[in-house]
Structures are given as structure tokens and as C-alpha cells.
Image (cartoon, coloured by chain):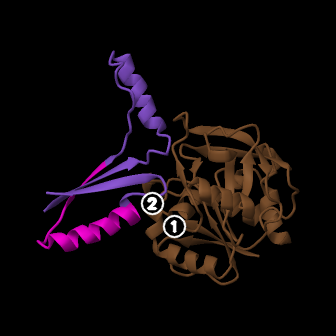
Amino acid sequence: MRFAVLQFPGSNCDQDAFNAIRDVLKQPVRYAWHKDTRIDPDETILVPGGFSYGDYLRCGAIARFSPIMGAVKAAAARGQTVLGICNGFQILCEAGLLPGALVRNTGLHFLCETVTLTVANSRTRFTSLTRDGDTLRIPIAHGEGNYRVDPETLKAMEDRGQIVFRYAGGAPNGSLADIAGVCSKEGNVLGMMPHPERACEPILGSADGLKIFQSLLNH
Amino acid sequence: MKAIVTVTPKKSILDPQGDAVRKAIHHLGMECVESVRVGKHIELEISGTNLEKTREKLDQVAKELLSNPVIEDYKIEIQ
């Protein structure tokens, strides 16, 4: 499986994602610069974390207009896999590829800690190696991870199984319905605030994040 | 001409920043402040004289870029 890791000015988890794919998952991977317009039809797209365009205006608001995002939207429409992590999740929401938005954490603090996630839907391509209710230990590092969406959309998302990950024991950031990760209606686009790429080797404290990448290979 | 776009968090969205500011105001002894909402004030200098067309275009810009309709409301004032 070939991967493309997007790079925006201000991305800072791109190299972690790249290394996790190349060195741990052992799959071919390349960087795609924000000014590029090419995404190949067989590529899985990773939108990494960081502070694209300095988080100016709103997190992800400017990145959405990058030339590469046109290619990402077209790829998503073709059914290609897109995984947005942290700032990547914010960008995918701003781009309209995922419903909802991410606002300031309830306690206003930047949260940097390892959390326990519960798999809420194991029937996605991102969770094919897990079972509903499985727990994953994965770190978060964000100031704006408080997921918001209107009640009708939330209900529809719950019914369709679009809530993929929840924070076990309550959301540290105030997220609606303890939501940590959601997927698109079609199931090929996933956004999550926790960083699976930072939890791919035991020496990093957890290898649970690898299950998400391995699930993609298994799919 | 000059336009001012004011972006505020929707009433239905909790504004933790506004709430923290409200508490700080209470610390200054002004306890009658019941609610604070923090938004953005965006000033634009615009060339041209077609007020109607500018307003229409600016409305689209405010909707698509300056605000996120999921979480924010906006208002446009042209001077």
C-alpha cells in the first residue's frame, strides 16, 4: 500500500507519520507538498498534525485552500483512503470532507497526555483489526480538539456508525459525546485528534496506534 | 471603502474563552457581568464603488473563509 503524507507550512507531525509508515509498517511512502496537485489513484493520504499556516483564523481554515487539497477532495470522492490526525482532522472538517468542527478545549489548556480510546465502530477500514469496545492507548496533543456538531447530524452519524473512536471515561477536552474520531458517510475518510503515529512502537510507550495502520493494510 | 466582519461563536456553542474572561472580570470586582463571548473583528480595505456587488461577494467570503458556519455567526458592516 502506497502512502502520501501531506506537508503544509507548519505541519510538525509529518516526519513521525512518514517514519511510522516506512520503518514500522514497512510500506512505500512519500511527502506531498501543499503546492503539489498530484495524488496518485492508489495512494492512501495522511493529513498530519501540527499548526498549518500558524492556525491563523481557525485551525485548518487556510490549509483547506491549498492546491493539494483539490487533489485530496477528488481522491476522497473516488473512494481513496484519507486519514487526518489532529490538525489533519481540523483541516478535513474545514474542507467539508468530515462533518462538524473542532473548537477550544473546555478547560482552555493545551492537553498533552496519553489517553485511552474505545473503538466505537470496528467495521471501518481503519479499525478492521479491532473489535467494538477494544481500548487503545494513544497520545493526544492539542488545544482545539473539542468536537462540535449539531444534534441532528450527530444523531445521523451515530446511526450510520460514523463515530469511530471515543475517549474512555470522558473526553478530557469537552468533546461532544466523548468523540475522538469520526469517519465520512462512505467510511473512507477518518479524522481523529489522538496521534496513532506516535504510538507505533513499544519504546514510545504504546504500539496501539499501529493497529489503525495495520487495519488499513488488512482491509 | 472599509468593511468590518465580526465573527462570534454561535449561541449554542460553549465559549470556554469567553467564560474564562467573564471569571477574570469578576476578579476585577465587576460581578454584574453575566456572560462574555469572545469573537473576531476583521477589517478589510476594499477598492471599488459597487456596494451591492461587494456586499454579495463579501458575504460569500465570510461564509466560506472568515467564519465556520458550524460553530460561528458573522455580521458584515460596510462603511
Q: Position of residue A176 (x, y in %)?
A: 63, 46
Task: Find disc 1 in the rendering and name its residue.
Answer: A95
Badge 2 crowding class, 10 Å Cα cut-off, few under 14, some 14 to 19, many 20 or more, is many
Mark with earlier residue (2, 1)? 2
Please tell me the colour of chain B. purple
- Looking at the rendered image, the quarter that the C terminus of chain A falls into is bottom right
The relative height of residue B51 versus residue A208 in the rendered view (above or below) is below
Chain at numbered mark 2: A
Numbered range of the magenta stretch: B41-65
Q: Residue at x 41, y 35 (%)?
A: B18
Residue A104: give its label.
none
Which residue position is annotated with label 2?
A61
In this rendering, position of residue A155 left or right of residue B60: right
Judge whether B16 appears above or below A59 on screen. above
Q: Quadrant of residue A174?
A: top right
Against A208, is B18 above or below? Answer: above
Which quadrant of the figure has residue A205? top right
